Each structure stands twice: as structure tokens, then as C-alpha cells.
Image: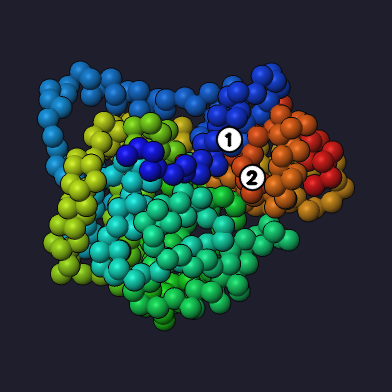
Amino acid sequence: MFSNLKEQPADKILALMQLFKDDPRPQKIDLGVGVYKNAEGITPVMRAVKAAEKQLWETQETKSYVGLAGDPAFADAMISLVLGDMVARENVAAAATPGGTGACRQAFEMIRMANPDARVFVSNPTWPNHLSILSFMKMPVVEYRYFDSNTGGVDFDGMLADLAQAKPGDLVLLHGCCHNPTGANLNLIQWQMVVDSLLKTGATPMIDIAYQGFGDGLEDDAAATRLVASSVPECLIAASCSKNFGVYRERTGILMAVAQDSSLRGLTQGTLNYLNRQNYSFPPDHGARVVTMILQDPELRADWAAELEQVRLSMLGLREQLAGELQRLSGSDRFAFLAQHRGMFSRLGTTSEMVDRLREDHAIYMVGDSRLNIAGLNKDSVPVLAQAIIDCGI
Ligand code: LMR
């Protein structure tokens, strides 16, 4: 039986993690997987997470099952973090999921149940795992233009032209902030135009928001999601706590189904509960409980927000240092986009051959599409990367 299985393609990002681990060169630099690292190269447990976990250890008296959608307090806290007061709570159905990936998977499952012919519009490029899951689920994918490698910005005219091809019953997948893998984002005027396009075509948006707090701050990073959720008849939101709470391995995420009134909430909530039951029964609780405790406790919340802000500012500083260094070495502004990008990633816009050269000749690891994780840098490695980019003739 097992011999009938076919070899599956390795996930590019995870394969790169292994390649980096196996590289014996001491000067190697990991700009691959999207994990935050401080200047010492460590992914720390955030202070508020440690404090909440300690409190939880002292007070938790059972680990019995919670509920198919997870703890309602987690949903309340996350809906408020992502949507603020832009959408009435009774209009939102929500279910905790194993990370943001779990939320994306459940969202696609829900859409496929609602419309087996749904096409999913995805940005070109998008997070490779979006494509991998959609292909695994055999859902048709339509790419819309997004990244302009000449400018390092968004090809917004191309994007709008492609989104105009969507129809009612299609899903349009958008990145709420800190676009992965490019780092190039829309401004709010452009987001309003995307909303107008969605209203015109009648397609349903789905927002993947995995980096809230990593771009322009917790509130600013949620602005586009709030605008969409409060403007269209229905939308889905897949939110991750992996990065902004640093709870990667706890698998903490949530799927929200938002409507403009509460008439379908029972139906959508029942569907989300059903989908959780079919795929893994109860979602993981530990990370969700810790996140809830942090968001509910003013002191823990303030400390978490302060630490997250430090993380954000350190990445911005590295972006500016890198853009400055490249300007100095190249004598041109062609890398200025690196300082304008937001979030953990930037796409350099070079060929996979150059990415291979950076790895082979300079021990610098980035994803094959030239996505680099800014948080993998520190003050000392920025000049090394900049020099390597110039030496490779990028
Ligand atoms: C990434 O894009 O590197 C992260 O989201 C990690 C992952 O699961 O791919």
C-alpha cells in the first residue's frame, strides 16, 4: 500500500532551513524562514508570554476539552485586536485554529463547501504554502499581478485590472499587512479602490493577517483589514499569533467569518465548528489561552505591545541601514524600496541563480524567489549582505 505513495515536493522554505542547519561555514547568515531573531540570533519567548505561562501553570486546574471553536474569550480578544470596534461582535463567527496556516486551510474548506467551483485569486507572488494547500485541495487558482520587480513596489494598475475578472462566488486572497513574500504593500487609498472593485465584482475577500504589529504598528497594520471587513457584505479573516506573540510552535491562530448582519452567524459558526471537528476536533489551547491572558490583562498587554514595538523598530532600523549601505556601495537609489517595504520580508527582485550564488559563495541564505527575512540580519551582518549583493552584480 505505502509503495503507491508518490514523492511530494519539499516545501521550499522548510527545505532551506535544513540546508542552513547543515552548512558548516561559521559566518553563514540565515535570511530564510519567517521567524523573528534578535541581534544575537535568538528567537526569544516574549516577556508577557513567559509571565502568562507562569500564571497559567500556577492557576490552571484542568486540561479537559474546551470547545470545538476554542475558548470564546480567545475569539473575543482576537476579534477586538484585529477588527477593533469596526464590526459588531454578533456579526462575526470565529474558530481557533492551529496557527494561521490552519485558519487558511479552514477558510478554503469553508469556501469550497459554499461553492465547489470557487476560484481563488492570489497575488503573484504569494506565500508558497497558500499555493501548496490550494493545489492539494484541487481548488482552481487565478493569479493577480502584484509585485513590480522594476520598482520594488506594487503593480497596482495590473492588480486592479486582474481583480476585475473575479465573479460572485470567487475568493480574493489578500495580505492584510506586511505582504509575504514581497514586503510591498498598498496604501489606504489603494485599499479603498480594492474594496470598490470587490463591491463591483461581488467576489468574497479573504484576508490573511499574519504580521500585525510588524509593519507600521498594531493599529495601522489592522487598518486595511478593518476597512475591508466593514465595507463588504462578507469576508473571511485568517489571523496568526505565531509572529506577533512569538508563539510559533504553539500553533495559535483564528479564522473569522464576518458579515454585515448577524442573520447567517449561526450557520457560519456551525460550519466552522464542524470543520474543526472533521480535521482535528479541538484546536490547540495553550497558545490561545496565553494570548487571551495577555490581551485581557492591561499590564501584560502593555508589556507585550512595548516588546512588539521594539521588534518592529529594530526591523525598521535594519531596513534603513541596509538601504543606506546599498546606496553607498552602488551609488544609486535602486535599493531604496528596502526601506519602504514593511514587515519581516523584502523581495530583492533578483534571479534564482543570484540567490544560489549568494548561498554558495557568501553563505547567505534567502528563499529562491529572493525573499529575505530582515529579522535574520543584525548591525554587523547588514554590511556583509550589502557587499555580497554588490559583489554578485545584483
Ligand atoms: C514563512 O513564510 O517563512 C513563514 O510563514 C513560515 C512558514 O510556515 O512558511
Q: CA distance from mark 1 to mark 2?
A: 9 Å
Which disc, if any, is residue 368?
Answer: 2
Residue drawn at the location 28% of the way across and 44% of the way down: 97
Quarter location, residue 302:
top left
Q: How is the image coloured?
A: rainbow
Q: Is residue 119 visible?
A: yes
| Mark 2, other Cα within 10 Å: few <14 / some 14–19 / many ≥20 | some
> 283 or 377, which lies in front?
283
> 389 or 382, which lies in front?
389
Q: Position of residue 346 (x, y in %)?
A: 62, 47
Task: Tell me the SS state at disc 2.
Answer: loop
| Amino acid beneath label 2 | Gly
> 50 or 18, which lies in front?
18
Which disc, if any, is residue 223?
Answer: none
Residue drawn at the location 50% of the way across and 51% of the way down: 127
Q: Residue furthest right?
A: 331
Mark 1 near mark 2, Cβ–Cβ under 8 Å?
Answer: yes
Q: Is residue 313 visible?
A: no
Q: Earlier in the sequence, mark 1 or mark 2?
A: 1
Residue drawn at the location 34% of the way across and 58% of the way down: 108
| Mark 1, other Cα within 10 Å: few <14 / some 14–19 / many ≥20 | many
Vertical position of residue 158 compared to residue 317: above or below: below
Q: Is residue 32 left or right of residue 393?
A: left
Residue drawn at the location 12% of the way across and 25% of the way down: 62
* Quadrant of the frame with the N terminus: top left
Residue beneath disc 1: 16
| Amino acid beneath label 1 | Leu
Task: Tell me the SS state at disc 1.
Answer: helix
Q: Position of residue 80 (x, y in %)?
A: 29, 51
Q: Position of residue 343 (x, y in %)?
A: 55, 46
Q: Position of residue 305 (x, y in %)?
A: 42, 37
Q: Is mark 1 within 8 Å of ligand 1?
A: no
